[in-house]
Amino acid sequence: MGQTIAEKIIERHAAAGRISPGQIVEARPDRILLNDVSGPLAFQEFERMGATRVSDPEQVVLVQDHFAPAPSLGGATALQAVRRFRDSQGIEHFFDVGQGGIEHTLLPQQGLVRPGDLIIGGDSHTCTYGAFDAFGTGMGSTDIAAALALGEIWLRVPETQRFIFRGSRRPFVTGKDVILRVLREIGVDGANYQAMEFYGLGAFSMDERMAICNMVVEGGAKAGFVAPDEVTRSWASGLFKDAFTLVAADEDAQYLATRRFDLEAFGPQVARPGSPGDVSDLADVAGRRVDQVYIGNCANGTLTDLRQAAEVLRGRRVARRTRLIVVPATQEIYRAALQQGIIDDLLAAGAAVSTPSCGACFGGHMGLLAEGEVAITTTNRNFRGRMGHPDAGIYLASAYVAAASAVAGAVCDPADVLGEGKR
């Protein structure tokens, strides 16, 4: 019997021989990722276990991205805890303020994610690495602490659903719209502790694939993968000098379900306040006023997202009663956007452009919402209270839709800003 991508990657890292879905195995991850929220908690558990040294410092990656730059004394203390752990354990893969950016965008840029890798992280959106043909999954701080001490972890092998897309996408449909359309179909629990494989997305860039895999956890999934193809191979070839091997599912792999979608059948999607699974067509929510627009996060602060925003905003202004915050995901993306004139376009339109940080996405700082305010964002969650006051409302959408909404001061179709010819 053939194997899925998840099964193949886990088996290659497991102590056991042949594995099967539902089996619990011991596996050695290639990377153990912590940030300044999950890190300090994991370090406490690490000490409570009686551990004094990490099993393999080369496995460990530390990224300061949630409370960076420090917005409060508590945030500064968390950042300090990560620095102290770095020093005491001799961790080389460490990225502080001004040195990197948001973890899930940063690691692939740094060559710390390879096809076929197994990556565990103290952050639920570690599933983003499926865009790069790697198994990434989030875990709690106690599990991460055990992995630091032992160099391995227990994993239950997930079953897999397959999602097949056909046809050509309509204008302004992005990777964000693909995953929102899938969540509209399966809901927030439609893939609990499963893997998700996506096919037929050859026209979508690596940046857009990140947006897709980033949000599989919003459907309950443990991991998600865009099936590797020439786009994946081109990315890997440009980054790794030595050999790499793409991991594809076998033709006779077994799936829990196969779902099919026609790309030509849907346009831009929007998740309504309260749940990333409460998704509708853009037309159904167009016209709702917005106080704030936020473009950024670990999978939608990419250069692709900034280009899309600049395309809409170039030569236009943010609506008078609306504010726009743009956060490039990494320093590398920020510099590229500067060099290409994108940042200038955004600033000229009235945007506030911030240093790379998770910031407002998780409700930490740099763009929180007050009572009764409404935002449209490119982030991945819109739960009540996620970005500030519990009585604020958050819509989730692509950078195209977010930028158009900034110009209109209300949820808006980008075609209405750019003109009918762009539909």
Image (spheres, grey):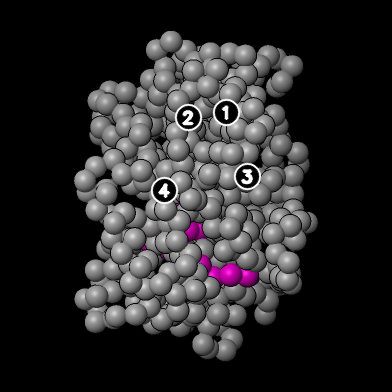
Disc number for residue 343: 1
Q: Secondary structure at mark 4?
A: loop
Q: Residues within 10 Å of mark 1 (few under 14, many from 20)?
A: many
* Quadrant of residue 117 within the rendered picture: bottom right
Q: Amino acid at mark 4?
A: Val
Residue 58's place in the image compared with 408, above or below, is: below
Q: Residue at x 66, y 16 (%)?
A: 418
Q: Position of residue 394 (x, y in %)?
A: 38, 31
Q: Amino acid at mark 2?
A: Val
Q: Residue at x 58, y 58 (%)?
A: 110
* Quadrant of residue 288 within the rendered picture: top left
Q: Amino acid at mark 1?
A: Ile
Comparing labels 2 and 3, the label whose residue is closer to the camera: 2
Comparing labels 4 and 3, the label whose residue is closer to the camera: 4
Give the mark, 4 or 2, whose residue is nearer the N terminus: 4
Q: Residues within 10 Å of mark 3 (few under 14, many from 20)?
A: many
Q: Position of residue 196 (x, y in %)?
A: 56, 59
Judging by the rendered image, the residue that carries numbered circle 4 is 97
Comparing labels 1 and 3, the label whose residue is closer to the camera: 1
Q: Secondary structure at mark 1?
A: helix
- Given residues 269 and 376, the one toward you in this image is 376
Judging by the rendered image, the residue that carries numbered circle 2 is 353
Residue 267's place in the image compared with 75, above or below, is: above
Judging by the rendered image, the residue that carries numbered circle 3 is 208
